[in-house]
Protein backbone atom coordinates (compact mmCIF):
# COMPACT_ATOMS: atom_id res chain seq x y z
CA UNK A 1 0.00 0.00 0.00
CA UNK A 2 1.19 3.60 -0.55
CA UNK A 3 2.24 5.96 2.25
CA UNK A 4 -0.80 6.67 4.46
CA UNK A 5 -1.90 9.37 6.90
CA UNK A 6 -2.40 8.47 10.55
CA UNK A 7 -6.20 8.93 10.52
CA UNK A 8 -7.16 5.28 10.03
CA UNK A 9 -4.36 3.83 12.17
CA UNK A 10 -5.20 6.14 15.11
CA UNK A 11 -8.91 5.33 14.92
CA UNK A 12 -8.15 1.60 15.08
CA UNK A 13 -5.60 2.14 17.87
CA UNK A 14 -8.08 4.19 19.93
CA UNK A 15 -10.83 1.60 19.57
CA UNK A 16 -8.42 -1.33 20.01
CA UNK A 17 -6.68 -0.11 23.17
CA UNK A 18 -3.16 0.00 21.75
CA UNK A 19 -0.74 2.64 20.41
CA UNK A 20 1.22 2.98 17.19
CA UNK A 21 4.98 3.40 17.54
CA UNK A 22 6.50 6.57 16.13
CA UNK A 23 10.20 5.99 15.60
CA UNK A 24 12.70 8.64 14.53
CA UNK A 25 14.73 7.88 11.41
CA UNK A 26 18.10 9.35 10.46
CA UNK A 27 19.78 6.82 8.17
CA UNK A 28 19.20 3.66 6.13
CA UNK A 29 20.00 1.16 8.89
CA UNK A 30 17.46 2.76 11.23
CA UNK A 31 14.71 2.78 8.56
CA UNK A 32 15.44 -0.87 7.78
CA UNK A 33 15.64 -2.03 11.41
CA UNK A 34 12.29 -0.45 12.30
CA UNK A 35 10.33 -1.45 9.20
CA UNK A 36 11.65 -5.02 9.09
CA UNK A 37 10.39 -5.48 12.67
CA UNK A 38 6.99 -3.95 11.80
CA UNK A 39 6.62 -6.01 8.62
CA UNK A 40 7.39 -9.23 10.54
CA UNK A 41 4.99 -8.30 13.37
CA UNK A 42 2.27 -6.93 11.05
CA UNK A 43 2.33 -3.61 12.86
CA UNK A 44 1.35 -0.17 11.52
CA UNK A 45 4.13 2.38 12.00
CA UNK A 46 4.93 6.10 11.94
CA UNK A 47 8.42 6.93 10.67
CA UNK A 48 9.23 10.42 11.86
CA UNK A 49 11.82 12.94 10.82
CA UNK A 50 12.98 15.84 12.98
CA UNK A 51 14.44 19.15 11.88
CA UNK A 52 17.82 17.75 12.95
CA UNK A 53 17.33 14.64 10.79
CA UNK A 54 16.55 16.81 7.74
CA UNK A 55 19.72 18.82 8.44
CA UNK A 56 21.79 15.64 8.87
CA UNK A 57 20.55 13.33 6.12
CA UNK A 58 18.81 15.73 3.70
CA UNK A 59 15.05 15.83 3.08
CA UNK A 60 15.19 13.99 -0.25
CA UNK A 61 17.30 11.09 1.04
CA UNK A 62 14.95 10.56 3.98
CA UNK A 63 11.79 10.65 1.84
CA UNK A 64 13.27 8.26 -0.72
CA UNK A 65 14.45 5.81 1.98
CA UNK A 66 10.95 5.78 3.48
CA UNK A 67 9.48 5.27 0.00
CA UNK A 68 11.84 2.29 -0.38
CA UNK A 69 10.54 0.89 2.92
CA UNK A 70 6.96 1.27 1.66
CA UNK A 71 7.88 -0.87 -1.38
CA UNK A 72 9.77 -3.45 0.71
CA UNK A 73 7.00 -3.72 3.34
CA UNK A 74 3.83 -3.93 1.24
CA UNK A 75 1.62 -5.41 3.99
CA UNK A 76 1.79 -2.65 6.61
CA UNK A 77 0.54 0.97 6.73
CA UNK A 78 3.46 3.42 7.01
CA UNK A 79 3.07 7.16 7.69
CA UNK A 80 5.89 9.70 7.17
CA UNK A 81 5.68 12.40 9.83
CA UNK A 82 7.55 15.63 10.60
CA UNK A 83 8.53 15.63 14.28
CA UNK A 84 8.52 19.05 16.03
CA UNK A 85 7.99 21.33 13.03
CA UNK A 86 9.03 24.71 14.45
CA UNK A 87 7.07 26.94 12.03
CA UNK A 88 4.68 27.09 9.06
CA UNK A 89 7.53 27.18 6.50
CA UNK A 90 9.11 23.90 7.71
CA UNK A 91 5.69 22.21 7.77
CA UNK A 92 4.89 23.50 4.27
CA UNK A 93 8.21 22.17 2.93
CA UNK A 94 7.37 18.70 4.27
CA UNK A 95 3.73 18.80 3.09
CA UNK A 96 4.93 19.82 -0.40
CA UNK A 97 7.79 17.32 -0.18
CA UNK A 98 5.98 14.02 0.29
CA UNK A 99 5.14 13.71 4.01
CA UNK A 100 1.71 12.38 5.00
CA UNK A 101 1.68 13.96 8.49
CA UNK A 102 3.32 16.95 10.20
CA UNK A 103 3.67 18.23 13.73
CA UNK A 104 3.58 21.95 14.40
CA UNK A 105 5.10 22.59 17.82
CA UNK A 106 4.39 26.07 19.16
CA UNK A 107 3.85 24.71 22.67
CA UNK A 108 6.43 27.07 24.18
CA UNK A 109 4.55 30.12 22.82
CA UNK A 110 1.49 31.82 24.38
CA UNK A 111 -1.83 29.97 23.88
CA UNK A 112 -3.24 32.33 21.22
CA UNK A 113 -0.02 32.29 19.16
CA UNK A 114 0.04 28.48 19.36
CA UNK A 115 -3.58 28.45 18.10
CA UNK A 116 -2.87 30.87 15.21
CA UNK A 117 0.26 29.10 13.88
CA UNK A 118 -1.30 25.64 14.29
CA UNK A 119 -4.48 26.74 12.50
CA UNK A 120 -2.44 28.08 9.59
CA UNK A 121 -0.59 24.75 9.24
CA UNK A 122 -3.85 22.76 9.54
CA UNK A 123 -5.51 24.76 6.73
CA UNK A 124 -2.58 24.20 4.37
CA UNK A 125 -2.10 20.54 5.37
CA UNK A 126 -5.76 19.54 5.05
CA UNK A 127 -5.97 21.20 1.62
CA UNK A 128 -3.14 18.82 0.60
CA UNK A 129 -4.44 15.62 2.25
CA UNK A 130 -1.95 15.76 5.14
CA UNK A 131 -2.80 15.46 8.86
CA UNK A 132 -1.48 17.62 11.72
CA UNK A 133 -0.31 16.90 15.26
CA UNK A 134 -0.13 19.89 17.64
CA UNK A 135 1.07 20.25 21.23
CA UNK A 136 -0.18 21.78 24.47
CA UNK A 137 2.05 21.78 27.55
CA UNK A 138 5.85 21.72 27.58
CA UNK A 139 8.06 18.64 28.01
CA UNK A 140 11.38 18.86 29.79
CA UNK A 141 14.55 17.46 28.23
CA UNK A 142 16.73 17.85 25.14
CA UNK A 143 15.70 17.04 21.56
CA UNK A 144 18.01 18.18 18.77
CA UNK A 145 18.36 21.92 19.40
CA UNK A 146 15.26 22.19 21.60
CA UNK A 147 16.25 22.25 25.27
CA UNK A 148 13.74 22.77 28.10
CA UNK A 149 14.75 22.70 31.77
CA UNK A 150 12.56 20.85 34.27
CA UNK A 151 11.73 24.22 35.86
CA UNK A 152 10.36 25.57 32.54
CA UNK A 153 8.34 22.45 31.71
CA UNK A 154 4.63 22.37 32.50
CA UNK A 155 1.87 19.79 32.42
CA UNK A 156 -0.94 20.26 29.91
CA UNK A 157 -3.92 22.18 31.34
CA UNK A 158 -6.95 19.98 30.55
CA UNK A 159 -9.30 22.99 30.61
CA UNK A 160 -7.54 24.34 27.47
CA UNK A 161 -7.76 21.30 25.20
CA UNK A 162 -11.32 21.60 23.84
CA UNK A 163 -10.89 25.23 22.81
CA UNK A 164 -7.48 24.46 21.27
CA UNK A 165 -8.68 21.51 19.21
CA UNK A 166 -11.88 23.30 18.12
CA UNK A 167 -10.09 26.49 17.09
CA UNK A 168 -7.15 24.79 15.30
CA UNK A 169 -8.81 21.73 13.72
CA UNK A 170 -5.71 19.64 14.51
CA UNK A 171 -5.98 15.85 14.06
CA UNK A 172 -4.06 14.70 17.15
CA UNK A 173 -2.65 16.34 20.26
CA UNK A 174 0.64 15.84 22.08
CA UNK A 175 0.29 16.48 25.81
CA UNK A 176 2.72 16.81 28.71
CA UNK A 177 2.02 14.35 31.56
CA UNK A 178 5.57 13.84 32.81
CA UNK A 179 7.44 12.22 29.91
CA UNK A 180 10.64 13.95 28.85
CA UNK A 181 12.99 14.10 25.84
CA UNK A 182 16.44 12.47 25.80
CA UNK A 183 18.28 9.74 27.73
CA UNK A 184 18.49 11.73 30.99
CA UNK A 185 14.80 12.26 31.67
CA UNK A 186 15.09 12.82 35.40
CA UNK A 187 17.79 13.79 37.86
CA UNK A 188 18.48 11.32 40.70
CA UNK A 189 16.99 13.97 43.04
CA UNK A 190 13.62 13.73 41.22
CA UNK A 191 13.57 9.95 41.67
CA UNK A 192 13.14 7.48 44.51
CA UNK A 193 15.08 4.22 44.88
CA UNK A 194 13.58 0.74 45.01
CA UNK A 195 14.71 -2.05 47.36
CA UNK A 196 17.63 -2.87 45.00
CA UNK A 197 18.82 0.74 44.96
CA UNK A 198 17.66 1.27 41.36
CA UNK A 199 16.29 4.75 40.52
CA UNK A 200 12.52 4.92 40.04
CA UNK A 201 11.25 8.03 38.17
CA UNK A 202 8.20 10.05 39.28
CA UNK A 203 4.98 8.46 37.95
CA UNK A 204 3.23 9.85 34.86
CA UNK A 205 0.21 12.09 35.55
CA UNK A 206 -2.56 9.72 34.46
CA UNK A 207 -5.08 12.05 36.13
CA UNK A 208 -4.19 14.74 33.54
CA UNK A 209 -4.49 12.19 30.70
CA UNK A 210 -7.90 11.05 31.96
CA UNK A 211 -9.16 14.62 32.30
CA UNK A 212 -8.00 15.42 28.74
CA UNK A 213 -9.66 12.25 27.37
CA UNK A 214 -12.93 13.08 29.13
CA UNK A 215 -12.99 16.46 27.40
CA UNK A 216 -11.95 15.04 23.99
CA UNK A 217 -13.74 11.68 23.65
CA UNK A 218 -12.41 9.61 20.75
CA UNK A 219 -9.59 12.06 20.04
CA UNK A 220 -6.06 10.62 19.56
CA UNK A 221 -3.47 11.70 22.12
CA UNK A 222 0.30 11.58 21.55
CA UNK A 223 3.13 11.02 24.03
CA UNK A 224 6.58 12.42 23.22
CA UNK A 225 9.81 11.59 25.05
CA UNK A 226 8.72 8.01 25.73
CA UNK A 227 11.88 5.97 25.51
CA UNK A 228 12.36 3.66 28.46
CA UNK A 229 16.20 3.84 28.36
CA UNK A 230 16.64 0.09 28.97
CA UNK A 231 19.23 -0.77 31.61
CA UNK A 232 20.82 -3.42 29.37
CA UNK A 233 21.80 -0.80 26.74
CA UNK A 234 23.13 1.70 29.27
CA UNK A 235 25.12 -1.04 31.08
CA UNK A 236 26.59 -2.29 27.80
CA UNK A 237 27.57 1.24 26.72
CA UNK A 238 29.26 1.85 30.08
CA UNK A 239 30.92 -1.60 30.05
CA UNK A 240 32.52 -1.00 26.67
CA UNK A 241 34.04 2.42 27.25
CA UNK A 242 31.01 4.71 27.30
CA UNK A 243 30.11 7.14 30.00
CA UNK A 244 26.37 7.54 30.58
CA UNK A 245 25.83 7.74 34.33
CA UNK A 246 22.27 8.24 35.58
CA UNK A 247 20.57 7.75 32.20
CA UNK A 248 16.92 7.03 32.98
CA UNK A 249 13.64 6.69 31.06
CA UNK A 250 9.91 6.00 31.38
CA UNK A 251 8.99 2.55 32.78
CA UNK A 252 7.48 0.32 30.10
CA UNK A 253 4.46 -0.62 32.26
CA UNK A 254 3.40 3.03 32.39
CA UNK A 255 3.62 3.36 28.60
CA UNK A 256 1.68 0.11 28.18
CA UNK A 257 -1.04 1.53 30.42
CA UNK A 258 -1.14 4.82 28.44
CA UNK A 259 -1.43 2.82 25.18
CA UNK A 260 -4.54 1.10 26.53
CA UNK A 261 -6.14 4.51 27.17
CA UNK A 262 -6.49 7.39 24.66
CA UNK A 263 -2.80 7.51 23.71
CA UNK A 264 -2.56 6.41 20.05
CA UNK A 265 1.03 7.40 19.20
CA UNK A 266 4.11 6.90 21.37
CA UNK A 267 7.37 8.52 20.27
CA UNK A 268 10.59 6.56 20.65
CA UNK A 269 13.96 7.99 19.63
CA UNK A 270 16.55 7.69 22.42
CA UNK A 271 16.12 3.89 22.68
CA UNK A 272 17.12 3.59 19.00
CA UNK A 273 20.25 5.64 19.63
CA UNK A 274 21.11 3.56 22.71
CA UNK A 275 20.57 0.22 20.90
CA UNK A 276 22.89 1.27 18.08
CA UNK A 277 25.58 2.74 20.33
CA UNK A 278 25.61 -0.28 22.66
CA UNK A 279 25.92 -2.63 19.69
CA UNK A 280 28.73 -0.69 18.00
CA UNK A 281 30.71 -0.22 21.23
CA UNK A 282 30.49 -3.93 21.96
CA UNK A 283 31.48 -4.80 18.39
CA UNK A 284 34.60 -2.63 18.41
CA UNK A 285 35.64 -3.92 21.84
CA UNK A 286 35.43 -7.50 20.58
CA UNK A 287 36.75 -6.87 17.05
CA UNK A 288 39.37 -4.12 17.26
CA UNK A 289 40.65 -5.11 13.80
CA UNK A 290 37.34 -4.42 11.99
CA UNK A 291 37.13 -1.37 9.75
CA UNK A 292 34.37 -2.20 7.24
CA UNK A 293 31.24 -0.23 8.29
CA UNK A 294 29.09 -3.16 7.21
CA UNK A 295 30.73 -5.28 9.93
CA UNK A 296 29.45 -3.07 12.75
CA UNK A 297 26.34 -1.54 11.14
CA UNK A 298 24.79 -4.93 10.38
CA UNK A 299 24.56 -5.96 14.06
CA UNK A 300 23.57 -2.36 14.94
CA UNK A 301 20.64 -2.61 12.50
CA UNK A 302 19.69 -5.95 14.04
CA UNK A 303 19.80 -4.34 17.52
CA UNK A 304 17.30 -1.70 16.32
CA UNK A 305 15.07 -4.43 14.90
CA UNK A 306 15.17 -6.46 18.14
CA UNK A 307 14.43 -3.39 20.28
CA UNK A 308 11.50 -2.33 18.06
CA UNK A 309 10.09 -5.89 18.04
CA UNK A 310 10.10 -5.84 21.83
CA UNK A 311 8.27 -2.47 21.90
CA UNK A 312 5.62 -3.56 19.40
CA UNK A 313 4.71 -6.65 21.41
CA UNK A 314 5.31 -5.63 25.02
CA UNK A 315 4.76 -1.87 25.16
CA UNK A 316 2.64 -0.64 22.24
CA UNK A 317 0.49 -3.73 21.69
CA UNK A 318 0.24 -2.96 17.95
CA UNK A 319 1.63 -6.29 16.69
CA UNK A 320 -0.85 -8.05 14.42
CA UNK A 321 -2.85 -4.82 13.94
CA UNK A 322 -1.70 -3.91 10.41
ZN1 LIG B 1 9.15 15.20 20.93
Image (cartoon, helix red, strand yellow):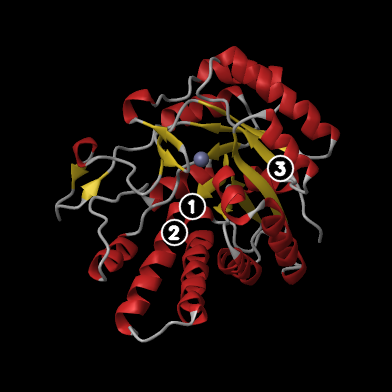
For disc 2, the marked residue is: 273
Query: How far separated are the C-alphas under marks 3 and 1?
Result: 18 Å
Mark sitting earlier along the chain (3/2): 3
What residue is shown at x 70% (from left), y 36% (from top)? 91
How far apart marks 3 and 2 lie (CA) works out to 23 Å
Which image quadrant is residue 239 in? bottom left
**Neighbour tally class for label 2: few under 14, some 14-19, many 20 plus, Cα within 10 Å:** some
- Do tag 3 and tag 1 residues touch (Cβ < 8 Å)? no
Q: Is mark 3 within 8 Å of ligand 1?
A: no
Q: Is residue 128 left or right of residue 159?
A: right
Contact flag, marks 1 and 2 (Cβ < 8 Å): yes
Is the CB of mark 1 within 8 Å of ligand 1? yes
Task: Find disc 1 in the rendering and name its residue.
Answer: 269
Residue 8 position in % (x across, y down)? 74, 46
What residue is at 41 percent from the left and 35 percent from the top? 147
Q: Which residue extends farthest right?
A: 127
Q: Position of residue 290 (x, y in %)?
A: 40, 84
**Does 198 appear above or below 109?**
below
Amino acid sequence: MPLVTTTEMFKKAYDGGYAVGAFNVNNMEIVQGITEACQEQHAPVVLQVSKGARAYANHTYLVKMVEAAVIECPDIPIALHLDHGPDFETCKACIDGGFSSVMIDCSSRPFDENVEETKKVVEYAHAHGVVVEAELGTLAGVEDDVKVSAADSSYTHPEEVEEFVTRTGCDSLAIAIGTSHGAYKFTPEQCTRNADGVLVPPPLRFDVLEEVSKRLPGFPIVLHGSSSVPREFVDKINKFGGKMPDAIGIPEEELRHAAQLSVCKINIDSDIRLAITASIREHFAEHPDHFDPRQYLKPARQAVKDMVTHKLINVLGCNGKA
